[in-house]
Amino acid sequence: MNEILEIVKNANSAKNALSSLSSEVKNRALLNIENGLIASYDDIFKANALDLEYANGLLEEGKITKSTYNRLKLDENKMRDLIKGIKDVQALGDPVNKIVWTRELDENLILKKITCPIGLIGVIFEARPDVLPQITALAVKSGNALILKGGKEALNTNKAFFKVIENALNNTELYPKNTVNLLFSHDDVKEILNMDEYIDLIIPRGSNKLVRFIQENTKIPVLGHASGICHIFINEDADTNIVNKVVIDSKTQYPSACNSVETVLVHKNYPDLPGLKHALTENGVKIIENPERYDFEYSDKILALKVVNSLDEAILHINKYGSHHTDSILTENNAACEKFMSMVDSAGVYHNVSTRFSDGFRYGFGAEVGISTNKTLARGPVGIEGLCIYKYRLYGSGQIVADYANGTKQFHHKNIFGL
Amino acid sequence: MNEILEIVKNANSAKNALSSLSSEVKNRALLNIENGLIASYDDIFKANALDLEYANGLLEEGKITKSTYNRLKLDENKMRDLIKGIKDVQALGDPVNKIVWTRELDENLILKKITCPIGLIGVIFEARPDVLPQITALAVKSGNALILKGGKEALNTNKAFFKVIENALNNTELYPKNTVNLLFSHDDVKEILNMDEYIDLIIPRGSNKLVRFIQENTKIPVLGHASGICHIFINEDADTNIVNKVVIDSKTQYPSACNSVETVLVHKNYPDLPGLKHALTENGVKIIENPERYDFEYSDKILALKVVNSLDEAILHINKYGSHHTDSILTENNAACEKFMSMVDSAGVYHNVSTRFSDGFRYGFGAEVGISTNKTLARGPVGIEGLCIYKYRLYGSGQIVADYANGTKQFHHKNIFGL
């Protein structure tokens, strides 16, 4: 049996033990990771320096972009946020074995819908090595097993982080072995994508190209988004102070983020379009009117601007060209706000705020494994809740279906909790 | 543009209007369907008689099985259950626009997780024409648009049902047009499976072969299960009265159902194995000990029987050979019950009851669109709740991310409701 298959099969077997793990054991494992990161602070930065040295060469040769280089680089702020994030995840409630609802089907026949881990999750990530401890923390808390596959550009940093995690978990009494694994070779990606028998979910973290490649090459469900074409619609009655502030934040606070705005739709009767254009230009934003295509992510200080005749036209535009990620309406009209929020088919629909709020930390999830535009799984920023599914538990005392089928007994379906 | 693509595109455009539809309009549409079925009772049976005449020929030629013929045949009981089911769905609460939770991120910055329809759902079904009105009722209540593709063996019955539905929806004031559509030709299936740009979810209802074909030939998420290999584990301390009653019901009450038991695992110290074997034989069940393979669905009065050394061995066997559908433990030991329920990775884990309870009607969902073994979407019997996803609504007053990034403001993440 090849080595990767063996790792994946072992992780798959080990995952069952995770589903019944107590909150105490999981939090102890997280505390060990937190302490390990603090203790290995210098080693991690040394490892990162090696990766940066190599990346610097690639940067000079034009093989990677400055933004890839920046994502690769750890600094004290990133490490501080990372360690704080792992502390925050410990403070969150246990998302596993939570009773969603309880219904009495008949006397002594109790049905409970209960949360449980998804199982074995494959994470394929590029550049950002801080993804590794962050996703591991969420997986530990939610009782999921992990196959992590990092990019070669962050090889040394990933190894340093993984060493901390491996030690932390091995030193956590009762924590099952083989549940968090790191793979290295680039060839591993294709192999992982074929292991639908063992892997329950794939989470890609990286370029649109990487995400699309994964979506097109696996039968395993993929959690994430390939592009982030977010919109702001400025209604005729929008508050001009809010408009300029929010549009500029949405575009310039981090232009390459997936939740940055790409297209601003302006109602034809909005009175201060010149003021908005002026503010954008002053902030270094290039405005493109009548672009060739609207389904385009600039990921830069560039945005498409379109004047529309109505709220309806704006909703149609967003649902047609958007990526169902995050879209905001700026208006003082509640009915327009509600209509926009109901009819825009996106994971995040906002009123009078920046699209940049779409983020697990800002939503209070502690951290996120990614942002999902899927319609049939977690949607929006995904924290520990999105890494759980549920099972139905039925507690009885010898009941058989024949009695209900032939009319001897009837269900009474009494809702006990959560319904 | 080809005809099917046009239908699908129209349905996709129409779906947005469904997400903001009031409960009153949806229930009026359901009442119109219910009344339509009653008014067209005779026409539906005449249509079904045509299909049965044709199917009778196929049956004589051995081209279809007796059980396919039976699934095709409507009778008064099926029609009564169908009409009652549509009445039940009206009585259920509206699953759309329900607030899952509310969190105040900061002053005047409110985040709400709110349910919404999935969107456009493609249903591909064989034989059973009663699936058509049943799934339509669930889709109407949950605000989803539908592309229905029935098998040619039920062509006339499907047309008769669809006529009722089309009239009912057209006569419901404010109900959007083009949201429920019926396709006929067999070639349509492949076309539908390629329309991942427009269709959000595929629900197959039919043979394992059909489900597997669909799973392997589409990038659209598929809700359902290909096989139903369900288990009963009889622990050493199981109540012998419960054992015989529950095993016989699980196997014989409807042997070809997906939730019938296929393998019975018996603890080596269970004292009355001879009694169980005798009872099974008396009820016409053939027992296979040491079968060639355990991942097999007999769909008949046949079951595999294996003696195991422990609860752990039973759990390993079920997770390895089962289809994560429904598995039951018979025991008087609570710790064993809890361990089984935590560690068996199935949509339904039961204690001291028949596996046959795994069903939307029995769970109190009114009806079901199918039973899902997916781990990343609805799991188990899927009613209207499983046809909804959620979106995050964020209500603000001009907040920008820059203020939180530079430390001018801090999130206070106050949980308001449901958290």
Image (cartoon, coloured by chain):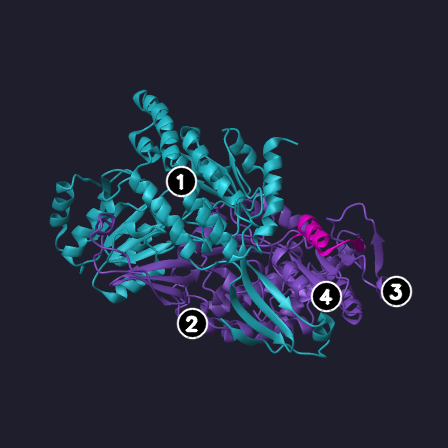
Chain colours: A cyan, B purple
Residue B251 position, x and y percent, is 77, 62
Q: Are marks 4 and 3 in contact (CB under 8 Å)?
A: no
Q: Amino acid at mark 4?
A: Thr
Q: Which residue is mark 3?
A: B278
Depth check: give the residue in front, B324 or B39. Answer: B324
Q: Amino acid at mark 3?
A: His
**Residue numbers of the magenta segment:** B304-323
Q: Amino acid at mark 2?
A: Ser
Residue A59 can be seen in this image: yes
Q: CA distance from mark 4 to mark 1?
A: 48 Å
Give the letter of the chain under mark 1.
A
Q: Which residue is mark 2?
A: B23
Q: Would residue A37 be found to the left or right of residue A336 on screen?
A: right
Q: Nearer the viewer, mark 4 or mark 3?
A: 4
Q: Which dot marks residue B331?
A: 4
Per the image, label 2 sits on a secondary structure element best described as helix
Q: Are marks 2 and 4 in contact (CB under 8 Å)?
A: no
The residue at the point 44 percent across, 49 percent down is A31
* N-terminal-most mark, 3 or 2: 2
Q: Nearer the viewer, mark 2 or mark 1?
A: 1
Q: CA distance from mark 4 to mark 3?
A: 20 Å
Residue A197 position, x and y percent, is 62, 43
Q: Which dot marks residue A39?
A: 1
Give the letter of the chain under mark 2.
B
Depth check: give the residue in front, B67 or B177. Answer: B67
Give the letter of the chain under mark 3.
B
Depth check: give the residue in front, B27 or A132. Answer: A132
Q: CA distance from mark 2 to mark 4?
A: 44 Å
Per the image, label 3 sits on a secondary structure element best described as helix
Magenta-drawn stretch contains B268: no
The residue at the point 70 percent across, 62 percent down is B329
* N-terminal-most mark, 4 or 3: 3
